Image: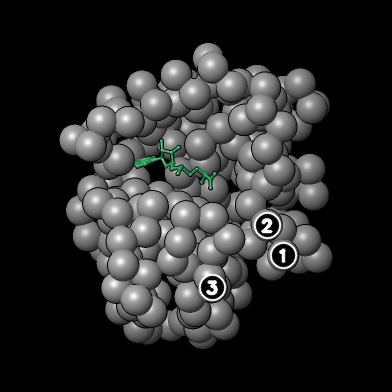
Amino acid sequence: MAASESFSDRDSWERRWEQALAQHGDAIVSKPPNPLLVGEFSDVEPGRALDAGCGHGAESIWLAGLGWRVTAVDFSVAALERGRATGTALDLGEQIEWLEGDLGVWTPEPAAYDLVSCLYVHVAGSAVEMVQRLASGVAPGGTLFLVGYPATDPETGEPTMAAGQNQVTVPDALAALTDGWEIEIAENRPREVGGGVDAVVRARRW
Ligand SMILES: C[S@@+](CC[C@H](N)C(=O)[O-])C[C@H]1O[C@@H](n2cnc3c(N)ncnc32)[C@H](O)[C@@H]1O
């Protein structure tokens, strides 16, 4: 990837997804869902979920397989089409709504979701504002789950593989969730790949 290539604009992501799916589509589709999400939500009663920045849909499809009704949002048409095809092939098509939307401005239906999950999304504007907007979709008693890959290692200050990107950090999430939230997890977990940490936040709405 060229150093100047952006991680926050739609055209760059569309090109990235088109190329990746053309070259390694089968490998991508067979990738397991995110282990942090699996670790937190395998035993949770299914309800309505929002997967914000769903990519090719591994997590949406996993949630649907557990009985969740999922709204899967991304701004890459190529990724959404692949997700829809995979979900349909697994007979989960009825449970997942694949929605084209820009998370820089897209606002969820208010207080509608038992789970809002946003994993590794690169933010063009303010991460705090995006978290607040996504959090507005969580129903009372529901859960917000965020994972971001900070651009620097908080321990060493060294750049990580996410250098130059703006993803959600623990301080961003805490700044966004000041009122009406119980913070259940807000921590940096060392990554096995790429250096640095995953910023993991789980919060329950009162
Ligand atoms: C690193 S991928 C993560 C995909 C998936 N959440 C996962 O964990 O595998 C980031 C995803 O966010 C999407 N994305 C980035 N910025 C976005 C935006 N402003 N609006 C909607 N989707 C966006 C990209 O198209 C891509 O599918």
Query: Which percent across, then down, holds residue 182?
Result: 51, 85
- Residue at horizontal 37 percent and vertical 70 percent from the top: 153
Residue 127's image quarter?
bottom left
Element type at mark 1: helix
Q: Calculate the distance from the C-alpha at mark 3 to the C-alpha at mark 2.
A: 13 Å
Q: Locate the N terminus and report the quarter of the image it occupies.
A: top left
Q: Where's ligand 1: which quadrant?
A: top left
Residue 23's image quarter?
top right
Query: Which percent across, then down, holds residue 97?
Result: 58, 34
Q: In this image, 134 relative to 165: left or right?
A: right
Element type at mark 3: strand
Q: Is residue 115 above or below residue 31?
A: below
Q: Please tell me the numbered disc located at residue 189.
A: 3
What is the three-letter code of the residue carrying label 3?
Answer: Arg
As drawn, the residue found furthest toward the top would be 22
What is the three-letter code of the residue carrying label 2?
Answer: Pro
- Nearest to N terminus: mark 3 or mark 2: 2
Residue that numbered label 1 is attached to: 39
Q: Calculate the distance from the C-alpha at mark 3 to the C-alpha at mark 1.
A: 13 Å
- Residue at horizontal 19 percent and vertical 35 percent from the top: 4
